[in-house]
Amino acid sequence: MGDTIRVTQALQNNSANYEAYQQFINSEEGQAFSKLFSEGGKFGDVLVTFDVSYDLDAGTRGVTTPLARDADGNTERLYAQDDIDQRIAPEGARTTLASGETLAFDVQIGAMTAASAEDPRNVTNKALTNLHESQHVDIVTRDVRRDGQMNYGGYNQHLMMKDPRYGNYLQQRINFYQQRRPDLSPEVVKKAVSGFSNQ
């Protein structure tokens, strides 16, 4: 895998989280993501870093933060124009890349405890979180590539993830989860992979 998809040492040190990441990245969906975002891929100039977080808010499984990255590796957070319009983002927040800057993403996945990791279903759920967050990366990258501006915030990104008109994001999650949870009905699988709020 190229250096443009990175996994922090902290994530690797959490064996359950790392197992979940491996389950994601080695899946058909993860390999498609890797093909796009690894060096030489369509979005190979985008730096994506997967990390583990021990202090996400309760109920938050993962957070993806888009960044503008300059040639020296310095980064600054990008905000969506629709979040600024709705006054969710701070005043004066950046929505566009400057000349010479590239996109980067900080993907924080909530840490698993040793107790929760004892149930392999929990590891699969965390692998699904990795897939979900990778879809945020994909949506924002395509958004910014269109006009140099980040237009869609989390609310609209989540709407796109549930609507087949915007791509195969929903079907990817269904396929991923169905293969790993054959004990569940299609209806339960679809509900499980769409059970996130639009916030």
Image (cartoon, rainbow, N blue to C red):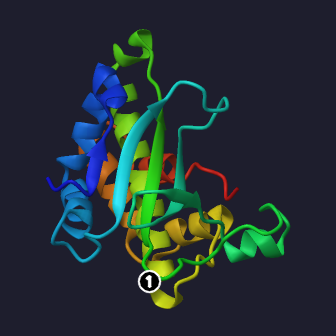
Work out whether 12 lies above or below 81. above
Side of 162 where 177 appears, left or right: left
Q: Position of residue 83 (x, y in %)?
A: 75, 68
- Could you tell me which quadrant the C terminus lies in? bottom right
User: Where is residue 180, by image quadrant?
Assistant: top left
Q: Residue furthest top?
A: 115
Side of 106 where 71 appears, left or right: left
Q: Position of residue 148 (x, y in %)?
A: 52, 84
Q: Residue furthest bottom?
A: 147
Q: Position of residue 39 (x, y in %)?
A: 18, 65
Pick the residue in front: 193 or 29: 29
Residue 5 in sight in this render = yes
Count every numbered label the image shows and give the total. 1
For image coordinates 73% across by 67% down, the residue present is 93
Dot 1 lies on which element? helix
Q: Position of residue 84 (x, y in %)?
A: 78, 71
For image coordinates 67% across by 32% down, the residue present is 57
Residue 178 in sight in this render = no
| Residue position for label 1 | 145
Neighbour tally class for label 1: few under 14, some 14-19, many 20 plus, Cα within 10 Å: few
Work out whether 159 lies above or below 173. below
What is the three-letter code of the residue carrying label 1?
Arg
Work out whether 175 lies above or below 168. above
Pick the residue in front: 175 or 133: 133
For image coordinates 53% across by 77% down, the residue present is 97
Work out whether 159 lies above or below 76. below
Pick the residue in front: 159 or 57: 57
For image coordinates 52% across by 90% down, the residue present is 147
